[in-house]
Amino acid sequence: MSKRGYISRYLLILKKLKSKSYCSFEEIQEYIERQVDFLQMQDDSLMIGFSKRTFQRDLKEIRNNFGIEIDFSRSLKGYYIVQNELENMNFQRMLEAFDMFNSLNLAHDLKPYVHLEYHTPQGTENLYGLLHAIKNNLQIEFSHKKFWEDRTKNRKVEPYALKEFKNRWYLVAKDLVDNSIKTFGLDRLTELHITRTKFICPDNFDVREKFRFFFGVISPNELLPDEIILSFDPDQGRFVKSLPLHSTQEIVLENEAEFRIRLKICVTRDFVMELLSFGDSVKVIEPTSLKKKVKQIYKNAISQYN
């Protein structure tokens, strides 16, 4: 069997155990055999048949290659995925990656039926090097160019974490010039050099807490979160309900005329631009300062057409 066939089978095992913990081997075997058509789309040379020996080998490969542990509970008589909260998040992303891998391969063979947006990697060539530096507390040097500046600057930083936002990756690091925490887009980061200089990461630094009340990657240290109330029309409201704007989102009102939410978030450029993307489907109720800011942006935009 090809690698595509193996990985597709691993994916099916994980999906089965994600949907129902403590499955017997027979349940997993039945599920795999029901998915033979899907597997054969990945590898037309696939031989039908899924034995206990094959299953045990698959569990070992899943553990060794992806760090996902599958164990058997004698009391509950079934297999289950062993994971803590962090591993659960990684597992969810792993499944997403597997799904994307298989979808892209299928799409190649089903071009008349599947249309994919053109997408190029955004600075991912430095991911492994940055992760190595973060894990080992090593200072790094690189060149970086902001979108709104013409010249490239050399940076020396202490790398703390990586953050993803809208298909782009960002480095969260302490800039050694002014000792402030900043974010750097990996797609604008070049000439990465990992030094041998060690640093001590602050015990009180938590990247989740750092961005807790922010939308996107801009997190000015001096800003405090506001209580923001937004009103959407019902159609847009259904979208915002299914895909919340922020982790603090709470539904205040939901009826046939309006969908209203409350957020606790800092007003940054990233957040304002997100609001503008909804056009006339959203209205800012509170705070007044944000309402005035959005109104002024629309006035400036209209003036360009006068």
Image: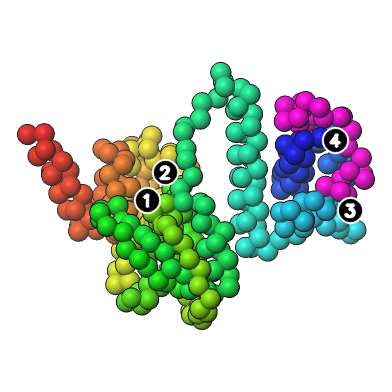
Q: Earlier in the sequence, mark 1 or mark 3?
A: 3
Q: Find disc 2 in the rendering and name its residue.
A: 240
Residue 250 found in image quarter: bottom left
> Which residue shows up at 39% across the image and 40% down it?
237
> Which residue shows up at 51% across the image and 68% down it?
194
Residue 44 found in image quarter: top right
For label 4, the SS is helix
> Which residue shows up at 43% across the image and 39% down it?
239
Q: Are marks 4 and 1 in contact (CB under 8 Å)?
A: no
Report whether 198 appears left or right of 52.
left
Q: Earlier in the sequence, mark 3 or mark 2?
A: 3
What kind of residue is marked 1? Ile
Q: Find disc 4 in the rendering and name its residue.
A: 30
Residue count near mark 3 (Cα–Cα under 10 Å), binned few <14, some 14–19, many ≥20? few
Classify the position of the C terminus by image quarter. Answer: top left
For label 1, the SS is strand
Q: Which residues are magenta?
A: 35-58
Report whether 188 appears left or right of 223.
right
Front label number (4 vs 1): 4
Q: Find disc 1 in the rendering and name its residue.
A: 261
What kind of residue is marked 2? Val
Distance from Cα at disc 2 to Cα at disc 1: 9 Å
41 falls in the magenta region? yes
Q: Is residue 85 above or below residue 121?
A: below
Q: Earlier in the sequence, mark 4 or mark 1?
A: 4
Distance from Cα at disc 3 to Cα at disc 2: 41 Å
Q: Are marks 2 and 1 in contact (CB under 8 Å)?
A: yes
Q: Find disc 3 in the rendering and name its residue.
A: 77
Residue 38 location, x and y as percent?
Answer: 73, 29
Closer to the camera, 295 or 14? Answer: 14
Q: Are marks 4 and 3 in contact (CB under 8 Å)?
A: no
